Image (cartoon, rainbow, N blue to C red):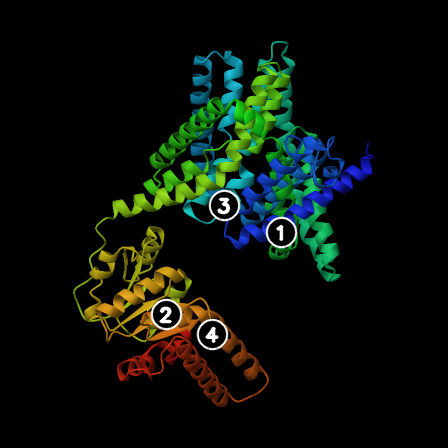
Amino acid sequence: MHGGLSDQVSDALVILGAAGIVIPLFARFRITPIIGFILVGVLVGPAGLGSLTDQAPWLYYITITDREAIAPFAEFGIILLLFTIGLELSFKRLWEMRALVFGVGAAELIGSGLIIGLALFAMGQNAAGALGLGLALALSSTALVLPISGTTSQVGRSALAMLLFEDVAIVPIIFMLGALAPYASADGVEGLMTTVWMGAAVIAAMLVLGRFILPKLFGQAARTKSPELFLAASLLVVIVASLATSAVGLSPIVGALIAGLLIAETEYRSEVEVITEPFKGLALGVFLITVGMQIDLAVIADNWVSLVTAVIGVVVVKTIVTGALLKISGARTGTSAEAGLLMSSPSETTLIVLTAAAEAALIQPETAAFWTIVTAIGLTITPILARVGHDVSRRIELKQHDQPDEVPEDEPRTIVIGFGRVGRLVADMLKTHKQPFLCVDSDIDCVAGGRREGYPIIFGDVARPEMVDRLKLGHARALIITMDEPVLANAVVKRVRGWVPDLPIIARARDVDHAAELYRAGATDAVPETLESSLQLSEAVLVDLGVPMGPVIASIHDKRDQYRRQIMESGGLTEKPTLKTQTLRDSAPGATPAEA
């Protein structure tokens, strides 16, 4: 009915249209676009509107009827994702993670695989098929987990370590399944050993050659000052590295990861990361659409009990195994629980292993189709599991610290709520000017890090009224609120103002409108981030243009006071700051609210 080229053009239009709708729409409601792309795949795939093209030919132009046609683009998206993960790492950091990668990572994959496999064997699946299914379902999604968790938090580092081992283990798993096939011969073992030594040789060659070639390649591209050439060089490196590892039987994502690690050791890392980011996001969206196309709502409706049972079983087993192993390795309970839930869904590579198991006749095609749908459902709910895991972790941490740290009984001090980047800067300035202070934060990692660096900081969640009461604000010199949670900040200001009418309250505001809300709630000073950054930019420009520093600072102060009066008026306030507030401001660090 339609030519091959027109099919590709139509599919491309559907994908680009989905990206143009899903990303801004879901961002507007602060929902991860991961779910949006998967839902688009369900809607426009062969089991959705694509099944109606015979009755309504016009649907052809807004659907994708051949999931295999866009599969290569989805694979390229995963390759780019692993490449950017490599850019965020370093060989030193990988070496530091070796215990997690080859210890917890190996134990998680083998432990989860054996438990799931034993359960399937007990339900009647043959031994080889149960082992293949167990290992397939034990894999977790690199494509979804790392964009959600990042690689810098404790949860992200733990997830990254386990995912790195899984990515390396894919090839041995597939070879093992081939060796277990009823018609397999000794060639399977011999092929695995050949892949191992050839793969090691290729990786070693990449590590050696990359250190000499990549700086020269990107240096030449940088001299041309052509973004297009820089992008072409980046994609060339990714593709060549992936093809090299694929040629010897390894996964292409191994080559992409190594290419990222090599570039991360050069001075061009940041530029490469920025220039490839849009392509990674779009290609990942294509992959997620292909995941959604695996979901047939009619099949789910007919088999929903067994499918839900299977999804729950896989999620529970992997959560328990992963969480327990991380706890044994020394992670906190909250981190273990969050990482366990985050890693509990099957993976995009599960689909590859299922295909290999079916081709090796270890499982029936119907069995592979059933677990394919389970995998697609698991991938779909991964963002939800991540959110649940985060909430569970927070509850565990709060329960373990149900009695917040006691507030020291000494001289009156300034209380700083929030110890992020803004709160830390405020604390540094207070310390510089020898002003006594105490910081409060509900992130136990943040509290532990601050204590190691010598900051006076306690653990506590000001969302709980009893925590605010424990701060003894009636004896405080001032309260500074730096957290980026507008609703909670407003609530704290209102509660404290009703309790301590004369306490100076200086609050960080997201924008001018939020500042007005804080003034209405009772803040003494509300500092909008957008206003302060504009004033600081103006100051820098005027000084660089040669205007004397004195007049510049005076004009910046005048402009700040002018805007402050306008914001207070919009917040329904007209009175001047109290003498106590003005004195505090004059003696505060930097003598301006900019640092607050």
* Residue at image mark 1: 277
Label 3 or label 1, whichever lies nearer to me, is: 3
Label 4 or label 2, whichever lies nearer to me, is: 2
* Sooner in the amino-acid sequence: mark 4 or mark 3: 3
Residue at the spot 36% in from the left edge and 82% down from the top edge: 574
* Sooner in the amino-acid sequence: mark 3 or mark 2: 3
Label 2 or label 1, whichever lies nearer to me, is: 2
* Residue 515 locus on image (x, y percent): 41, 71
| Screen quadrant of the N terminus | top right
Q: How far apart are the alpha carbons under marks 2 and 1?
A: 37 Å
Asked which secondary structure carries label 4, the reply is helix
Q: Could you tell me the amino acid type at mark 3?
A: Ile
Q: How far apart are the alpha carbons under marks 4 and 2?
A: 16 Å
Count residues near mark 3 (Cα–Cα under 10 Å), then give few for <14, some for 14-19, many for 20+.
some
Residue sitting farthest toward the front: 55
* Residue at image mark 2: 518
Mark 4 touches mark 2? (CB < 8 Å): no
Number of the label disc, if any, that sits on residue 532: 4
Label 3 or label 2, whichever lies nearer to me, is: 2
Mark 1 touches mark 4? (CB < 8 Å): no
